[in-house]
Image (cartoon, rainbow, N blue to C red):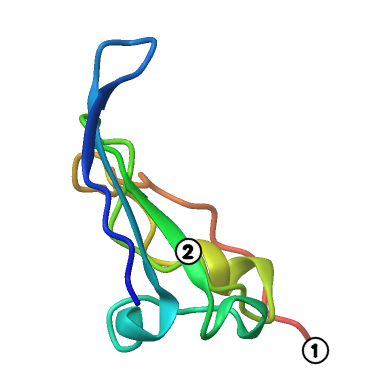
Amino acid sequence: MITQSLKNKKTSSQTECARQTIQSNLLEGILQIPNSLKNRLVEVILLPIDSNKYCNHSNKKTGSHLQRFAGAWCGDPLIREDQGNYEIRETLK
């Protein structure tokens, strides 16, 4: 049995949100459900994100710090400026 209670509620910042109570097994393939929540009644809360500071990238942790941040830049395209002249060094013997 699924208890569905869809509520539009104002939070302290006057933002609308949607809340629904549903069986977690119906969300498989849509959300990653932790094993501890599988086949249980859960509440799903949807909140709008109105800022560009949030990117569409996974929160899944990877091995190194560099891999977690690779591709996460959300700002203007990065442009490498001219590096100018560099000193010519003697060759190593």
Is 35 drawn above or below residue 19 in the view shown? below
Within-10-Å neighbours for mark 1: few <14, some 14–19, many 20+: few
Within-10-Å neighbours for mark 2: few <14, some 14–19, many 20+: some
Identify the residue at horizontal 61%, vertical 73% (top origin): 61
Is 82 drawn above or below residue 65 in the view shown? above
Q: In which quarter of the image is the C terminus?
A: bottom right
Q: Which of 41 and 54 is in front in this view?
A: 41
Q: Nearer the viewer, residue 87 or 18?
A: 18
Residue holding disc 1: 93
Q: Nearer the viewer, residue 54 or 4?
A: 4
Q: Nearer the viewer, residue 86 or 7?
A: 7
Quadrant for residue 68, please give it: bottom right
Give percent across and percent down for residue 17.
25, 34
Give percent across and percent down for residue 70.
45, 67
Give percent across and percent down for residue 92.
75, 82
Give percent across and percent down for residue 14.
26, 11
Identify the residue at horizontal 20%, vertical 40% (top origin): 76
> Gap between marks 1 and 2, in whole Å?
69 Å
Q: Nearer the viewer, mark 1 or mark 2?
A: 2
Looking at the rendered structure, the secondary structure element under dot 2 is strand
Is 83 drawn above or below residue 71 in the view shown? above
Residue holding disc 2: 42
Label 1 sits on what residue type?
A: Lys
Looking at the rendered structure, the secondary structure element under dot 1 is loop
Q: In this view, does 42 lie to the left or right of 55?
A: right
